[in-house]
Image (cartoon, rainbow, N blue to C red):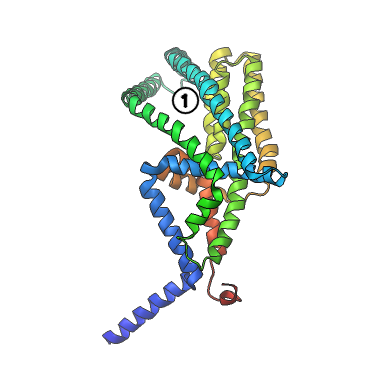
Amino acid sequence: MATQELSANLLFFRDFFKRFLPNSQAVALAIILIVSFVLIYSLSGLLMPVFVSIVLAYLLEGVVSKAESMKIARLPAVYLVFSVFMAGLVFLLFYLIPIVSQQAVELVQQVPEILNRAQTGIMRLPEMYPKLISESKVQQMMFAVQRELLTYGQNILSHSAASVVGLVSVMIYLFLVPMMVFFFLKDKQMLVAWFLQFMPRDRHLTVRVWEEIDVQIGNYVRGKFGEVFILWAVSYATYATMGLNYAMLLAVFMGLQVIIPYIGATLVTFPVLGVAYFQWGFGGDEFMYVVIAYSIIQMLDGVVLVPILFSEAVNLHAVAIIIAILFFGGLWGFWGVFLAIPLATVVKAVLTAWPRLGDKGLDANY
């Protein structure tokens, strides 16, 4: 009896592994995926500059390839693309970030005045709507808000105490990342050949999955960078023309909102409309102009930019996107949020290409 149960268990496990690992190709792909995930997850703290450099080099590789398709030799194309990348980095570090930081400090300094005005307006609600809200509830709500803001202020002070360590990390990134990006682009073929010698020889399924992932992720991430830049430029030009305070800071928020689909557009609404309200109030025409301009920019992003920039990207269900953001964001923070959709695309590509029992020509194709 025990022998029959043991045999049944063995058959069950054999069928289980045969169903999910039907051939050597699937075994090789599974090993590559598991080892890659373990290495990235366990070494992300130590080798994050390397991973960031690989991501940036991968993005720039698409531009280098387009330059090569225009009959430009690879080495001059690498120098040209890397020079543009460094110019953009200099613009970001010495122009954009100082302005955004200054406006962020000014906005934080205005928080007490903003809270006082908000409290004055909220305290009028019991007089206007006595049946809906009482003065005691308003006081409780304001006390809770002040307590939360105090907690946030204490957290900011505690983080600022570690600013020296953060500054050292930033300096390391600024030195190492551009250098590694250049060498990843310049010596791509040599590095890829070195890496492939550690890969299984029987990797046709892995190559097929990678080719699909390469197209999808390349289109998505490069399109996302283009979307961020366009939204930032259009928003800054619009808000600066309208005379809205903190135009550069709000424009950066408008650009970065696309990193978190669905959620980002909701979160950025509060600072944009909040600044407009405290600058002009609800009664001013300027506030309505800001609301209209903000709505038009969001509409153009969804109706024009997204279809153009992501026409070749794989569509994912909204639930899958939200789950990917929560999961990968919890693992790797900002970079996990930014790469959530590409990583979800990787998962989808693997599941789509994974061989299954009963597929015609399974053994013949692999």
Q: Is residue 269 visible?
A: no
Residue occupying the point 51% across, 25% down: 93
Taking the image as shown, residue 156 lies to the left or right of residue 185, namely left
- Considering depth in this image, is 223 or 366 the residue closer to the camera? 366
Expressed as whole percent of the image width and height from the top left, the position of residue 131 reads 46, 23
Expressed as whole percent of the image width and height from the top left, the position of residue 203 reads 52, 65
Return the residue found at the far left.
2
Expressed as whole percent of the image width and height from the top left, the position of residue 22 reads 49, 73
Residue 170 occupies which quadrant of the picture? top left
Expressed as whole percent of the image width and height from the top left, the position of residue 5 reads 31, 82
**Looking at the picture, which amino acid does disc 1 mark?**
Leu
Q: Secondary structure at mark 1?
A: loop
Residue occupying the point 66% across, 26% down: 234
- Considering depth in this image, is 360 or 282 the residue closer to the camera? 360
Q: Quadrant of the C terminus?
A: bottom right
Asked if residue 283 is positioned above or below residue 300 in the image, the reply reads: above
Asked if residue 1 is positioned above or below residue 177 in the image, the reply reads: below
Asked if residue 276 is positioned above or below residue 58 in the image, the reply reads: above
- Considering depth in this image, is 308 or 262 the residue closer to the camera? 308
The residue that label 1 is drawn on is: 132
Taking the image as shown, residue 145 lies to the left or right of residue 278, namely left
Residue 108 occupies which quadrant of the picture? top left
